[in-house]
Amino acid sequence: MQIGAQLYTVREYCNTLEGFSDTLKRIADIGYKTVQISGTCDYEPEWLRDELKKNGLQCVLTHTSGQNLIDNTESWAKKHDIFDCDMVGLGHHAFDGGKDSLQNFFKVYTPVVETVFRCGKYFMYHNHASEFIKLDGKPILLHIAEHFSPQKAGFTLDTYWVQVSGGDPAQWIENLKGRVPAIHLKDCAFDRTMSVVGEGNINFDRVFQAASRAGTRYMLVEQDDCNGENPFDCLKRSYDFLKSRGLA
């Protein structure tokens, strides 16, 4: 497994191409070799290809808005060929807990998943908390897993949101074995504060073991809220913790 950085953590530094370029260098200087692109300014895929190469980085996953995925599915997926990225991700969808919201999700995103697959890419869905609302006795996340073929769609399972929702991150990784090529590592403190990996209360040793058994290839550090700390410092401390566990 490789560890990487989710650029949503440092999104405030990526509002311009100059800042985005500098951010990629700073990420590489920490020691990360892979990244997920999310929350940045607009960029041309050729520009990203060149910046990644310059810094010895690989983009393994992107997140974009649901509207972009719906309106520009094929063109967006094909842009990933230019910077050599195999996974096209959706970062958020709001479920209100009703069956109608789930059925509407299937109606809208089934064509997206099919088009992404036809373009030679793999669709990845990222969970928050609402996916653990139960419908007919099981979480929405399982309904999504049952609806989409494992060959066409997987999950960027987020350890923090699983924990906040009352679940066991390691167990959910095992539940989705074979469908979690990338996961988000995000720690959770006692008051549900998002934390540096290794500084909260998630049992990451179990997460790493489960991820290895589940076929996970990339574990991407993400911290949406750094609680006033410098996000690069947070990414560095997460990297150091992962290194101490023999993962970097």
Image: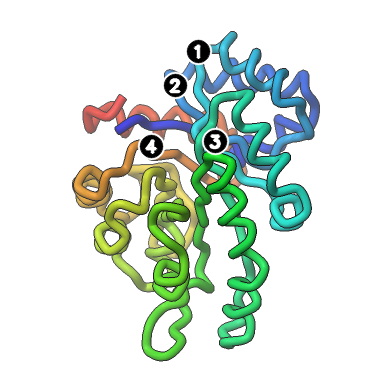
Callouts 2 and 1 close, C-beta under 8 Å: yes
CB atoms at circles 4 and 3 under 8 Å apart? no
Label 2 with label 3: CB-CB less than 8 Å: no
Label disc, if present, on residue 33 of the rendered structure: 2
Sequence-first tag of 1 and 3? 3
Q: What is the C-alpha distance between the residues marked 2 and 4?
A: 11 Å
Q: Reply above or below: 239 against 57.
A: below
Who's the residue at 50% across and 51% down the image?
124
Measured as percent of width and height from the top left, residue 219 is found at 38, 39
Q: Amino acid at mark 3?
A: Gln
Q: Nearer the viewer, residue 238 or 67?
A: 67
Within 10 Å of the Cα at label 1, are there few (<14), some (14-19), or many (20+) other Cα atoms? some
Say which amino acid is labelled 4. Tyr
**Which amino acid does the dot numbered 2 rest on?**
Lys
**In the rendered structure, which disc, 4 or 3, sits on the residue that comes first in sequence?**
3
The one nearer the camera, 118 or 148, is 118
Q: What residue does disc 4 label?
A: 218
Classify mark 2: helix, strand or loop. Answer: loop
Mark 4: which secondary structure?
strand
Q: Is residue 67 above or below residue 205?
A: below
* Residue type for callout 1: Gly
Instruction: Name the residue at the top extreme.
Output: 54
Residues under labels 1 and 4: Cα distance?
16 Å
Residue linked to disc 3: 36
Mark linked to residue 56: 1
Res. 63 image quadrant:
top right
